[in-house]
Image (cartoon, rainbow, N blue to C red):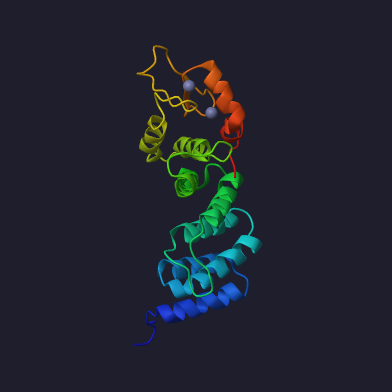
Amino acid sequence: MPGVVKRSSAKANTHLKQAADLGSYGAMINLAATTFRREDVTQTQTAVKYATLAHHYATGKTVNNANLLLGDIFQKTKQQDENGFGPSLNLATHYLGLVVKNDPNAFNGVAASQYSRVLMEKSENLFGDRCMSGLNEIPRAVYWMRKSLAAGNLDAKGVISRMESMETGKCSACGMTEEESDKKFLRCGRCKIYWYCSKKCQLAAWEAGHKVDCKSTFC
Ligand SMILES: [Zn+2]
Ligand SMILES: [Zn+2]
């Protein structure tokens, strides 16, 4: 039939690749995203390649699209391809960190939420439920989940209350619980996550590394 163009995803892909190779940032991101969404592990390198090109060359807000996509790829890809491209929580943290550093409200708070989640996942992988002082990413994760809510992502609300309740009523320095003690526990006024049985325990925890964990908002 004249005037009718047949749908062809292979052709669309060829055109997309041509546009990307000619330097269109939108095409680079588009190609990387479709390749990633196909969940073909042998193609991870291609997805990373085009998203990285966009990361380097795109300007303005488009850079955030590229970085969010790179964060997505490294966080959610299931396994490594034959060239070693695959999941990496460190790289996911890096790229999502760039997005929120550039714009804390990016994608209406969805980027901040994803950054927070990848920090939590990294923390669980490294330490289980006992984080090492000075290397603890949980205050940062909570900070970004709060930012996400402030930017309009209402899904963050429940996550924040779960995060805040994890440590409630437990001295994070000596382990005593508020039930075992006759005193009212003190909460860190900055991160509002950790609790202490006494000023002494609070100071000890601060010096042992909480002053690093509590203050840094980026990795
Ligand atoms: Zn204590
Ligand atoms: Zn704190």
**Residue plotted at (38% across, 32% down):** 161
Horizontal and vertical percent position of residue 2? 37, 87
The relative height of residue 92 versus residue 135 in the rendered view (above or below) is: below
**Quarter of the figure with residue 56:** bottom right
Q: Nearer the viewer, residue 1 or 75?
A: 75
Horizontal and vertical percent position of residue 145? 46, 39
For residue 39, side relative to residue 90 (left or right): left
**Residue plotted at (64% across, 57% down):** 59
**Residue plotted at (44% across, 37% down):** 149
**Quarter of the figure with residue 135:** top right
> For the view shown, which residue lies furthest in the bottom direction?
1
> For the view shown, which residue lies furthest in the top direction?
182
Horizontal and vertical percent position of residue 35? 46, 70
Specify the quadrant that holds the N terminus. bottom left
Label total for image: 0
Specify the quadrant that holds the C terminus. top right
The relative height of residue 201 versus residue 122 in the rendered view (above or below) is: above
Q: Nearer the viewer, residue 47 or 168?
A: 168
Q: Nearer the viewer, residue 181 or 58?
A: 181
The relative height of residue 169 versus residue 100 in the rendered view (above or below) is: above
**Residue plotted at (40% across, 26% down):** 168
